[in-house]
């Protein structure tokens, strides 16, 4: 979603998305996912975005410490039906949204911004010394 779309999300969308995120985190923390690619992996769910009709949700996931995001997303997609069933048991929603997973790139983006800021600071310091 673009920034302008984020502003237009309703309170209901935001609330349901956050409830889905909490339920997803709870399922992961309890170790209910039995996929071998997820064994012993710490997973971060940074955000869940839900469609306006509340029938589709995209969860942004990453490995704690980074690495192999594609394998993580594929493993989570394999577990999507199970996750949807468990979310339906935990939440009281008229429709349980279909869950899709996407690698969270926000941490990489923040690192790039930090590098740019550091390089700009170093350049400014070297100019001031000269």
Image (tube, rainbow, N blue to C red):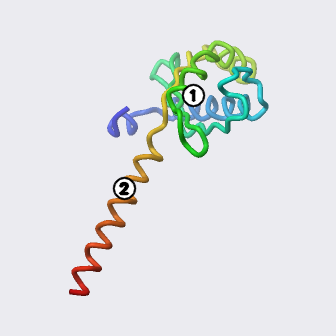
Q: Is residue 127 above or below residue 104?
A: below
Please give the residue where the numbered disc 1 appears in the rendered image: 72
Number of numbered discs? 2
Query: Camera-side residue: 3 or 101?
Result: 101
Left-right relation of 57 to 90: left
**Residue 25, image x and y in percent?**
68, 34
Please give the residue where the numbered disc 2 appears in the rendered image: 113
Does the residue at mark 1 contact the one at mark 2 (Cβ under 8 Å)? no
Q: Nearer the viewer, mark 1 or mark 2?
A: 1
Q: Residue at x 66, y 29 (%)?
A: 24
Q: Residue at x 56, y 20 (%)?
A: 99
Left-right relation of 74 to 114: right
**Residue 8, image x and y in percent?**
38, 34
Tell me the quarter of the picture where residue 28 sits.
top right
Left-right relation of 43 to 1: right
Per the image, label 2 sits on a secondary structure element best described as: helix
**Residue 1, image x and y in percent?**
38, 32
Query: Camera-side residue: 60 or 103?
Result: 103
Q: Is residue 107 above or below residue 119?
A: above
Query: Camera-side residue: 82 or 129?
Result: 129
Q: Residue at x 59, y 38 (%)?
A: 63
Where, quadrant-wise, is the C terminus in this rendering? bottom left
Mark 1 Cα shell of 10 Å, populated few (<14), some (14-19), many (≥20):
many
Q: Is residue 24 above or below residue 124?
A: above
Query: Camera-side residue: 123 or 91?
Result: 123
Mark 2 Cα shell of 10 Å, populated few (<14), some (14-19), many (≥20):
few
Per the image, label 1 sits on a secondary structure element best described as: helix
Q: Marks 1 and 2, how far apart in space?
A: 25 Å
**Residue 40, image x and y in percent?**
72, 34
For marks 1 and 2, the one nearer the N-term is: 1
């Amino acid at each position: 979603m673009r920034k302008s779309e984020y502003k237009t999300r309703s309170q209901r969308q935001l609330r349901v998305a956050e409830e889905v995120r909490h339920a997803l985190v709870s399922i992961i923390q309890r170790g209910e996912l039995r996929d071998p690619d997820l064994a012993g992996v710490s997973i971060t769910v940074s955000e869940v975005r839900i469609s306006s009709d509340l029938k589709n949700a995209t969860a942004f996931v990453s490995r704690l410490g980074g690495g192999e995001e594609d394998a993580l997303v594929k493993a989570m997609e394999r577990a999507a039906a199970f996750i949807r069933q468990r979310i339906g048991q935990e939440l009281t929603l008229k429709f349980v949204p279909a869950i899709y997973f996407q690698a969270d790139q926000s941490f990489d983006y923040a690192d790039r911004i930090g590098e740019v800021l550091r390089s700009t600071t170093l350049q400014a310091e070297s100019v001031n010394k000269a």
